[in-house]
Image (cartoon, coloured by chain):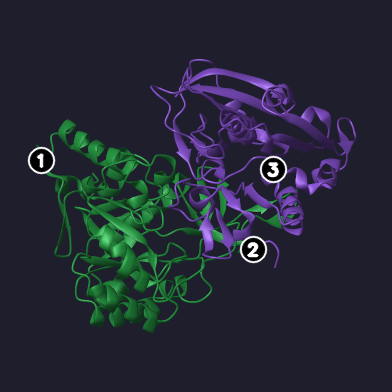
Chain colours: A purple, B green
């Protein structure tokens, strides 16, 4: 794929837009891509979730947090550069196969990335989701305006600089659990576990997108496993990255 | 037209390129990216007598020009392989070789005997070199006596091509190679991963759940090449070379060092169609240098 645009959108985040050669394959929100890193120092591809797509122009956006050598190299890509990408990989959120009418989309940090694509998809199905995002501070909650195109956005920050002070699971939105019929969440594991615990206590359907260290991205190397109640260790890249919390062994 | 075919024992391969166990799943994972049938062989992931859950997450750490893994032979056991995987993989028009591992000699023998009954599996690769399991695995492969013991026990129960995969975590790999040759192996493949470790300094913790793991990728290639060169001179049986091969040039270096065939491992994770490209690249190299056959470059180091 060819770089159409690449620009910083936060203190440590870049928005990489790639042009797909030809018509985009069908993709489900929550699926990801494996991007080859343009640096001799980095061996493995980087798994990055699909942030949004533009079907008319065959563009795919990736919201990438710059954390190390690999993501720094991806942030340095210039318009016109070529990137080898495998996509779409894995299984996304279940909105195409499960009835949902009042979804709550919870994101933490760069974990908001796949939720924009999910918001776009839900909007196409006539559903207006509620977004609830958490971060340490306001500047780390990325792309707020984009999300607000598709639904209402609520926030929590640890320093109180935006929204309510605290964690997403303490937000007043959750006082009335009847407002929602399903949670889709993506973010750091401690946040996902807290969200899953809340969902379990309130008997709400909940799907979480996991971010494990991966090598191949196609279910061959068995590096990125998560323990499940039904099948034991399964590859997050192939069986996930999105899991219904009922499959996970987080509550034992 | 150059000849790419090679032989390991009595088994013919259409070319010397195989995919290494544990890096290519059951082949089916890669079918979207390449034509599996163009390969000399695929070696499917480590199979054990009983199902194994493998090690807890995290199982992988990236290192400069390499990676560490600590998968720990996760697989659903040989019966599952026979019932569910074999019917699929037997359809491939290439040699499908099963990597066999175990915690005891009896396990290895039983697992090999079951696979012996499968018509379309012409060979096994006996894994006496996995560094990521508590019992068995590498323990058998680091001493000539125990290596010979497990190989001769399996030899009695298995009558097709028997390849033995060797560990680099030894003082003298040629000693182990000679021992398994004496015990009836048809071929040796080397190297399995090198024992390594990674630490997260910020958290002051090991990255892998098992603390140590097996290192692979381009970083291990010089060590692998040296061991293949030494072993090819030390034994009469054919040597299969692997360890960090990422290109046709890398593959040719192993053939020149004396390998009769090569395996591609970690590179499959970076480019899922790399093995097919290596086949093409070897063919190009032979034409460019005026060789008629890949046999002309095996051990042809000047």
Q: Where residue A104 is drawn, which disc sits there?
A: none
Q: Earlier in the sequence, mark 2 or mark 3?
A: 3
Cα separation between marks 3 and 1:
57 Å
- The answer to whether B211 appears left or right of B289 in the picture is right
Q: Share a chain, discs 2 and 3?
A: yes
Q: Quadrant of residue B206?
A: bottom right
Label 3: few (<14), some (14–19) or many (≥20) C-alpha neighbours in 10 Å: many
B37 over B237 or under it: above or below: above
| Between marks 3 and 1 in the image, the one whose residue lies nearer the viewer | 3
User: To which residue does mark 1 refer?
Assistant: B292
User: To which residue does mark 2 refer?
Assistant: A249
Q: Dot 3: what SS?
A: loop
Image point (45%, 35%), residue name = A87
**Considering depth in this image, is A146 or B73 the residue closer to the camera?**
A146
Cα separation between marks 2 and 3:
18 Å
User: To which residue does mark 3 refer?
Assistant: A187
Q: Share a chain, discs 2 and 1?
A: no
């Amino acid at each position: 794929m060819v770089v159409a645009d690449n620009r910083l959108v936060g203190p440590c985040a870049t928005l990489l837009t790639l042009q797909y050669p030809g018509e985009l394959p069908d993709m489900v929100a929550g699926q990801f891509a494996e991007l080859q890193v343009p640096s001799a120092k980095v061996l493995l591809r980087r798994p990055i979730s699909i942030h949004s797509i533009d079907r008319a122009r065959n563009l795919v956006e990736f919201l990438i947090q710059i954390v190390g050598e690999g993501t720094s190299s991806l942030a340095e890509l210039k318009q016109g550069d070529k990137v080898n990408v495998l996509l779409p990989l894995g299984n996304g959120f279940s909105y195409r196969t499960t009835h949902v009418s009042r979804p709550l989309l919870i994101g933490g940090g760069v974990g908001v990335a796949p939720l924009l694509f999910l918001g776009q998809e839900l909007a196409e199905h006539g559903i207006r989701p509620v977004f609830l995002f958490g971060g340490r501070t306001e500047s780390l909650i990325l792309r707020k305006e984009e999300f607000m195109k598709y639904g209402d956005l609520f926030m929590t920050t640890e320093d109180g600089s935006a929204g309510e002070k605290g964690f997403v699971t303490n937000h007043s939105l959750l006082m009335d659990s009847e407002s929602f019929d399903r949670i889709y969440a993506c973010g750091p594991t401690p946040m996902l576990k807290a969200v899953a615990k809340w969902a379990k206590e309130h008997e709400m359907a909940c799907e979480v997108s996991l971010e494990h260290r991966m090598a191949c991205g196609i279910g061959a190397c068995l590096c990125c496993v998560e323990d499940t109640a039904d099948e034991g260790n399964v590859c997050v890249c192939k069986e996930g990255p999105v899991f219904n919390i009922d499959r996970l062994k987080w509550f034992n | 037209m150059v000849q790419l075919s090679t032989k390991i024992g009595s088994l013919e391969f259409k070319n010397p390129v195989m995919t290494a166990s544990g890096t290519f799943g059951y082949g089916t994972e890669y079918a979207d990216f390449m034509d599996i049938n163009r390969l000399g062989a695929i070696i499917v992931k480590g199979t054990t007598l009983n199902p194994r859950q493998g090690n807890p997450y995290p199982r992988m750490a990236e290192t400069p020009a390499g990676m560490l893994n600590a998968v720990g032979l996760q697989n659903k056991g040989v019966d599952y392989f026979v019932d569910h995987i074999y019917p699929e993989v037997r359809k491939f028009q290439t040699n499908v070789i099963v990597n066999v591992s175990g915690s005891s000699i009896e396990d290895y023998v039983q697992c090999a005997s079951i696979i012996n009954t499968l018509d379309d599996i012409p060979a096994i690769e006996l894994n006496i070199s996995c560094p990521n399991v508590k019992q068995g695995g590498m323990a058998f492969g680091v001493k000539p006596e125990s290596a010979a013991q497990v190989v001769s026990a399996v030899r009695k129960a298995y009558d097709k091509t028997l390849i033995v995969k060797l560990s680099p975590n030894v003082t003298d790999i040629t000693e182990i190679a000679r021992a398994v040759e004496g015990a009836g192996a048809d071929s040796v493949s080397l190297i399995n991963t090198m024992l390594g470790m990674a630490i997260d300094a910020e958290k002051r913790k090991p990255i892998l759940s098992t603390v140590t793991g097996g290192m692979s990728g381009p970083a291990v290639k010089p060590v692998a090449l040296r061991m293949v060169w030494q072993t090819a001179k030390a034994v009469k049986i054919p040597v299969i070379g692997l360890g960090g091969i990422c290109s046709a040039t890398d593959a040719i270096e192993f053939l020149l060092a004396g390998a009769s065939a090569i395996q591609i491992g970690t590179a499959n994770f970076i480019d899922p169609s790399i093995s097919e490209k290596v086949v093409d690249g070897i063919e190009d190299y032979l034409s460019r240098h005026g060789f008629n056959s890949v046999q002309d470059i095996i051990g042809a180091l000047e």
